[in-house]
Amino acid sequence: MQVFHGLEYKKKGHFAIRGFFDLYCTHGPLTTEPFTRLAEKYRYFRVIETGWPKLDPYFNYEKRQNEKPVILYAPTFSPNLSSLEILFEQIKSLASSGDYDIKLKFHPKTKPQWQKLYQTLAEMEHFEICQNDNLIPLIQHADVVISDTSSAVDESLLLGKPVITFNNSQPQDALINITAAEQLTNALEQALSFSDEQQLKINQYITQVHPFTDGNSAQRILAATAQIIETGVMQKPLNLLRRYKIRKALNYMKLK
């Protein structure tokens, strides 16, 4: 039996059905509903809403009050999408003001020249380049997250954090999206004095994308898998051409 799970709902082709999976585990209504319609159409796989196991550790923490607002800056590494160069002076100004604690988390693939640029701020009292590879505690600790088009955006929103994005590739109501560097200061003020309307937008996002906050999505996937094994899988299409291509790519041509 083969099980599919993921949160890549924004990517083109995410809902393409290849004829290989017996069970699709979805993370919330946003993906459950389209996959359910596809299950009714194809009739050889089942869909069970479980949540995303990657997020399980995110919900196991106690929120604490920071002495100063903690701002996590978690930009992407992609040259076409990253805000690192454009927002440098604004990040420097926020750190030098002393009003915030700025924490920067580079993506491992970030250009060395961009990393060197921000290392010039390392001596500032209220600026820190985080070396920990684990993004989870950084998002948990932050009062506001600044990014651009990065997975940190979705993961922060799902914890109810205010998120400021710079030129996000797919801006949505739950984000405070800016399109010019000089807008960052006002956006940060907005994020720190969050309105009920903006909080409602985040709550609606959570309800649609990932309503599970108990940290038990992995257990639900195991339970869903056991349920399908017990009830029995349905016959899938032969899909011989795709099977051949996959075996050829893996250099595994043994026939069963």
Image (cartoon, rainbow, N blue to C red):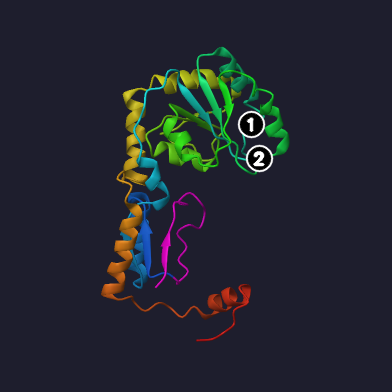
- Residue annotated with mark 2: 110
Quadrant in which the N terminus appears: bottom left
Name the residue rendered at 57%, 73% in the picture.
246
Q: Is the magenta stretch mostly helix, strand or loop?
A: loop
Q: Quadrant of residue 137?
A: top left
Name the residue rendered at 30%, 63% in the picture.
224
Q: Residues within 10 Å of mark 2 (few under 14, many from 20)?
A: some
Q: In which quarter of the image is residue 63?
A: top left
Instruction: Provide the secondary structure element on which disc 2 rests.
Output: loop
Q: Is residue 49 visible?
A: no
Q: Where is residue 235 in the image (x, y as percent from the top left)?
A: 37, 79
Residue 168 is inside the magenta segment: no
- Residue annotated with mark 1: 84
Q: Position of residue 157 (x, y in %)?
A: 41, 37
Q: What is the number of the mark on residue 155? A: none
Q: What span is colored magenta in the figure?
A: 1-20
Instruction: Provide the secondary structure element on which disc 1 rests.
Output: loop
Residue located farthest toward the bottom when viewing the structure as drawn: 256
* Residue nearest the observer in this picture, 34 or 141: 141
Q: Is residue 229 above or below residue 190?
A: below
Q: In this view, does 107 lie above or below 89?
A: below
CB-based contact (under 8 Å), mark 2 and mark 1: yes
Q: How crowded is mark 1: few (under 14 residues within 10 Å), some or many (20 or more)?
A: many
Mark sitting earlier along the chain (2/1): 1
* Residue nearest the observer in this picture, 254 or 26: 254
Q: Which amino acid does label 1 sit on?
A: Leu
Cα distance, mark 2 to mark 1? 9 Å
Q: Nearer the viewer, mark 2 or mark 1?
A: 2
